[in-house]
């Protein structure tokens, strides 16, 4: 299998598109995003894992557009909450993509949890599907850290203000995009994705 000339980034999330384009800028492949297409199906994320949702998104969009498509599913896994919010990270507080409400709910549920039990990790799985909707491969990235006591920082999106990787000494929302793109779950998954892509 040869490396595709063009890959569609299968997300409507502008923040993710920026991170993906930045991470893959040195790969000799043309990257399009969904704004280049008129009729993109709304994919129902009803699988029970990040890999399942990423694969479903990539396959359904690839079939609809007849293009190579990469799609990811990612989320926050918190030990003290039994793995929640997990695959429901984007709609944890009810409405999809309400970052502020999601963070507030998480901090409420973590209130009183001692420092040593605040372990968490961001997980990202990226799937690449061919133009007929068959998965070529999936890769995974995991970013270990803790849940902070309060929201800190203005950068990033999602749970970045409450996720504290001890090695960095600050929340992800206090890091620059360049710093984040070296260590985050999506950065690690994209690094693995890039390697697999170049090996095709």
Image (cartoon, rainbow, N blue to C red):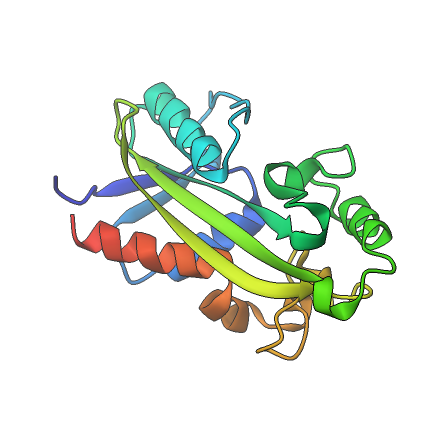
What count of labels does the image hold?
A: 0
Residue, x 24% and y 50% (percent of image)?
197
Residue, x 58% and y 57% (percent of image)?
121
Is 170 situated above or below 163? below
- In the rendered image, residue 130, in percent from the top left (x then y), is placed at 26, 31
Residue, x 54% and y 68% (percent of image)?
180
Question: Quadrant of residue 120 in the image?
Answer: bottom right
Nearer to me, 10 or 109? 109
Which part of the image, by quadrant, shows the N terminus? top left
Q: Taking 134 as reference, is 51 left or right?
A: right
Nearer to me, 188 or 155? 188
- In the rendered image, residue 54, in percent from the top left (x then y), is placed at 44, 36
Q: Does the image show residue 138?
A: yes
Question: Quadrant of residue 111 in the image?
Answer: bottom right
Q: Taking 108 as reference, is 33 left or right?
A: left
- In the rendered image, residue 72, in percent from the top left (x then y), is placed at 46, 42
Residue, x 16% and y 47% (percent of image)?
200
Q: Does the image show residue 24?
A: no
- In the rendered image, residue 157, in percent from the top left (x then y), is placed at 66, 55
Is 130 situated above or below 116? above
Is 40 situated above or below 3? above
């Amino acid at each position: 299998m040869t490396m595709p000339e063009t890959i569609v980034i299968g997300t409507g999330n502008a923040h993710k598109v920026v991170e993906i384009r930045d991470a893959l800028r040195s790969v000799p492949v043309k990257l399009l995003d969904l704004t280049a297409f008129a009729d993109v199906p709304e994919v129902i994320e009803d699988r029970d894992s990040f890999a399942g949702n990423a694969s479903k998104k990539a396959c359904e969009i690839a079939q609809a557009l007849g293009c190579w498509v990469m799609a990811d599913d990612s989320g926050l896994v918190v030990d003290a909450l039994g793995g929640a919010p997990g695959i429901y990270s984007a709609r944890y507080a009810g409405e999809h993509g309400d970052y502020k409400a999601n963070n507030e709910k998480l901090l409420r549920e973590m209130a009183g949890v001692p420092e040593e039990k605040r372990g968490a990790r961001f997980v990202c799985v990226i799937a690449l599907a061919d133009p007929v909707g068959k998965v070529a491969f999936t890769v995974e990235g995991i970013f270990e850290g803790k849940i902070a006591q309060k929201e800190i920082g203005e950068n990033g999106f999602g749970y970045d203000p409450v996720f504290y990787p001890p090695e960095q000494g600050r929340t992800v929302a206090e890091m620059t995009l360049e710093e984040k793109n070296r260590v985050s779950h999506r950065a690690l998954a994209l690094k693995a994705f890039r390697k697999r892509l170049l090996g095709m």
